[in-house]
Image (tube, rainbow, N blue to C red):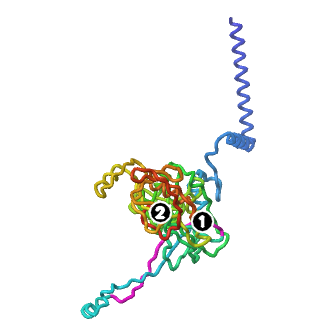
Amino acid sequence: MNQQFSISKAFGSLLLLLFGGGIALGGNYLVNHPQAVANLTNKEILESKENKIDWQETTSANNNTSNQIAVPQNFVTQVVEQVGPAVVRIDASRTVTTQVPAVFEEPFFREYFGSQIPEMPQEQIQRGLGSGFILSSDGLILTNAHVVDGADNVEVTLKNGRSFEGKVMGTDPLTDIAVIKIEAQNLPTVTFADSEEIQPGEWAIAIGNPLGLDNTVTTGIVSATGRSGAQVGVADKRVSFIQTDAAINPGNSGGPLLNAQGEVIGVNTAIIRNAQGLGFAIPIDTARNIAEELIAKGKVDHPFLGIQMATITPELKQQLKSSRNLDLTADQGVLIVNVVPNSPAQRAGLQSGDIIQSINKQEVQEPSEVQQLVEETAIGNQLLMSLQRDGKTIDLNVEVGVLPTPQSSNQ
């Protein structure tokens, strides 16, 4: 027993001696070779960083002592950098002449109120501000029609400050689309998405010059699609609007609405009054089709039937029964409220009180559905309309005509 204890004690002493010697040798190496140890430490650090996510980036300007956290750019920043140079500011002005009412020309008023009657005619210059975006590198620009409507002078300013005189190639008030041309080359341009594929909930980014505040960016989501002009309070517009909660204010008009990839999905418009918290945009597919016609011939020919319509509801049936003594038997369909004189609808035999049940064998229940089918039909082609009249079903072929002037109803 004592012999085993002595052996263990001797072995422990030997280990302590070896350990102490190792410390001494290591300390001596550290004192005499400090750089080698530093290099080893740096190498280990670099090797360990290769196996980890690089959350920080060390930068140095004038020395190596300042560290800065590298924050990756978010997708909105990237979209703005990508598309921002292709978004322009549009300043438009027009001269308006006001005439004094003819009654003030009468001698009686001239004799007694001559000094108070304003001189005539009076000219005033009205100025407007909007946005737009570049379609082609040689200076074709898309914007809203109401931005340049009746303008005598149009000035286009790029993001880099360069200004050009703009020529209005054409406007289409019915869709609120216009095309401007400036004399320039090698301009930055936008890319387009398929607006038919847009889904509610997608990101929406608006770039423009709201209230004169240049290069403003707002974000939100696509709140809804397929909003008709009647639904949003502009029944004279033949547009199926995109609804967004991205802020769109006067001055944003004509600017692009973008998706998360920086592709244009719509043309922002601020014509919707009292739309607090809501913005609306014209789908880019519609805008491009209109723009192509404006570029080619300076105007757009819209298909036209010449009917005013309403959706059949219990409330409408009751109103017609009390006001016109008209007892509708159908519970669904589209009621023809009025037929425009000398229109394609009148020539085909459509009458007020007819109920449209289907067009080309496709059932319809809303005026917007009828309008969409008409809009998709080439001028001169015929539509087969199935109607209910006096409790009977009749079929009529209606040849689609050309809309003479923008109408202020669902025609």
The secondary structure type at the circle numbered 2 is: helix
At label 2, the amino acid type is Ala
Q: Position of residue 49 (x, y in %)?
A: 67, 42
Distance of label 1 from label 2 (alpha carbons): 44 Å
Q: Quick one: label 1, few (<14), some, or many (20+) residues within 10 Å?
A: many
Q: Residue at x 37, y 48 (%)?
A: 329
Q: Nearer the viewer, residue 114 or 387?
A: 387
Q: Residue at x 43, y 52 (%)?
A: 388
Disc nearest the viewer among 1 and 2: 2
Q: Position of residue 224 (x, y in %)?
A: 48, 51
Q: Residue at x 29, y 91 (%)?
A: 106
- Residue at the disc numbered 1: 86
Residue 383 visible (yes or no): yes
Q: Which region is colored magenta?
A: 118-137
- Label placed on residue 188: none
> Looking at the magenta stretch, what is its main secondary structure?
strand
Q: Position of residue 365 (x, y in %)?
A: 45, 50
- Disc 1 and disc 2 in contact, CB within 8 angstroms: no
Residue 254 vs 277, above or below: the answer is: below
Give the mark nearest the N terminus, 1 or 2.
Answer: 1
In the shown orientation, is residue 28 left or right of residue 62? right
Which quadrant: the N terminus?
Answer: top right
Q: Is residue 2 magenta?
A: no
At label 1, the amino acid type is Ala
- Label placed on residue 345: 2
Query: Quadrant location of residue 167?
Result: bottom right
Residue 220 visible (yes or no): no
